Image (cartoon, helix red, strand yellow):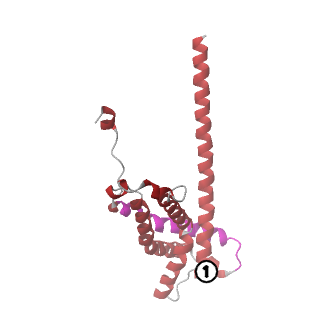
Amino acid sequence: MTQTDEQLPPPFVFQPWMLFIFLPIPPLLATIYTVTGHAMLRTEAPDPNWHSPLAASAEAAAIGGIILAIPVALLLYVLLSTGQTTAEDFFEDESQHFDLGLGEKNIRRFVGFFVLAVMVMCMGGMAAPLGVTCLVQVNLKRKVLTASKAAMSGMVGGVVLVSILIFLGFLGCFGWVGRIKRSRTFTVSNHSHHSM
């Protein structure tokens, strides 16, 4: 073993207990998405049901998010655990991993993460009607959005907020790339100035 090998950090190994860190995220996202969408849709809506309390929508989304947190966490566990290399994978024939161009395992992981990303964006649309159903079963007179309106609120809030985050992410990437280019240009010009 060389000195360079000794300085390399150990590879990341996913542990099941890390899922507990992820569990609060679905109810939090569902609550934020649903309340945002409800607040946007109720402004000019003539239907009095849209004027249900935002707190009730937040409660419904949180309850639905808690219910969906475990299935989403299990999906995340499957995606992350299948990507780790084991002794069996090491001795496996490499030709099996390139039968679909990029490798069957890589394509499966890509599809899985794409499904997970869609679920994260649609978390409010899935969790809110589920929570509304639970609240109505407990208290039939509870003033809360209908399941369809709750789903619409969650979807609208999710699409709007995720679109804003994607836009800000692109702006950040462009700014970061531009800063690197300016830094390299300044370094090259400064080096050329000193070499003259």
Left or right of 31 in this view: 178:
right
Q: Is residue 23 visible?
A: no
Above or below: residue 185 compared with residue 59: above
Q: Residue drawn at (59%, 60%), measured in percent from left and top?
A: 162
Task: Give the residue type that dot 1 points to.
Answer: Ser
At 47% from the left edge and 71% from the top edge, which residue is drawn? Answer: 65
Specify whether 20 is left or right of 56.
left
Specify start and end residues of the magenta stretch as a single range: 18-46
Residue 73 horizontal side relative to residue 29, left or right: left
Q: Nearer the viewer, residue 98 or 62?
A: 98
Task: Name the residue at 62% across, 64% down.
Answer: 159
Establish if 11 lies above or below 49.
Answer: above
**Residue lying at 61% horizontally and 40% vertically, measured from the top left:** 175
Quadrant holding the C terminus: top right
Give the percent coordinates (x, y) of residue 188. Answer: 59, 22
Residue lying at the far left of the rendered structure: 1
What residue is pinned by disc 1?
Answer: 148
Residue 20 on the magenta segment: yes
> Which quadrant: the N terminus?
top left
Q: Quadrant of residue 35?
A: bottom right
Q: Residue furthest top?
A: 196
Report x, y in % for residue 42. Answer: 66, 73
**Up-down relation of residue 173 to residue 61 (above or below):** above
